[in-house]
Amino acid sequence: FSSCEEEEIVSQSTANAKVQIIHNSADIAAQSVDVYLNSELLLDNFNFRTSTPFVDIPANEEITISIAPSTSMSASQGIVSYNYFLEENKKYIIVANGHLSPFGYMPLKNFSLEVFDMGRENANSTSNTDLIVFHGSTDAPTVDVVKTGVGAVTIVDNASYKDFTNYLELATSNYTLDIKDESGQITVASYQAPLLSLNLMGSAGVVVASGFLNPSN
């Protein structure tokens, strides 16, 4: 966010909120998109599975965020638009999710921007890593997330599509996480979460369920 246009957007308002935007729409038609704030280009060629840092966005006034094709020339070419009224000094996480295409995916989930309004840039304790989990896999069922190994525990219970959890304040270590079905009996996937190896002590982040559980969908 270093272009002249983007700096001008920020300077026009004395009241700001901080916003992080995450592109999690697995629709091929949305592989790369342009994002407009009101009439100004905010993100050019914003790619799937990338995110912004927290950036200043005008608060205490209505704003419009528009999603347009990566070849767009203006906000008027937006495919979808959303209006927001952000509160000064709050931190928001916005996740782009679902499908822009009217067919080709099963199940078909409408494109949306999902908003969490209690974001964190740092962990509450310097010895922890604070993580929020967002369920953004369009064909995955309601799931549990279980931290395996010694002291195995369910850290996310019954997360459904488009759900945000509360922040998990985890000791900074390397974990294996099993994704289980709603009953907690069947493991559908397993992932490494190397918080210590990534040197995330004192950091906060977003864990996103992304893509398709069944690629044929």
Image: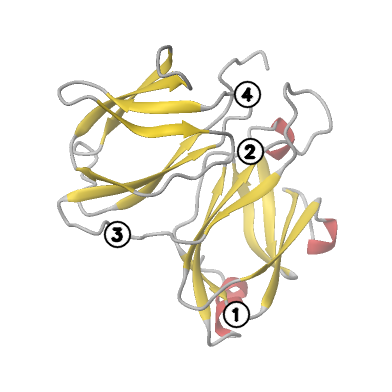
Amino acid of disc 2: Ser
Looking at the rendered structure, which numbered label has been put on residue 122?
3
Dot 2 and dot 3 residues touching (CB under 8 Å): no
Element at badge 1? Answer: helix
In this figure, which colouring scheme has been used for the structure? secondary structure
Residue lying at 74% horizontally and 23% vertically, measured from the top left: 105
Looking at the rendered structure, which numbered label has been put on residue 25?
2
Q: CA distance from mark 1 to mark 4?
A: 40 Å
Q: Earlier in the sequence, mark 3 or mark 4?
A: 3
Element at badge 4? Answer: loop
Amino acid of disc 1: Glu
Q: CA distance from mark 3 to mark 4?
A: 31 Å
The residue identified by callout 1 is 8
Q: In this rendering, does residue 11 appear at all?
A: yes
Q: Quadrant of residue 178?
A: top left
Amino acid of disc 3: Asn
Amino acid of disc 4: Asp
The x, y position of residue 18, in whole percent, is: 48, 68
Total numbered circles: 4
Mark in the foreground, 1 or 4? 4
Mark in the foreground, 4 or 2? 4
The x, y position of residue 117, in whole percent, is: 50, 61
Q: Earlier in the sequence, mark 4 or mark 2?
A: 2
Q: Is residue 151 left or right of residue 5?
A: left
Looking at the rendered structure, which numbered label has been put on residue 44?
none
Crowd around label 4: few <14 · some 14–19 · many ≥20 (10 Å): some
The residue identified by callout 4 is 139
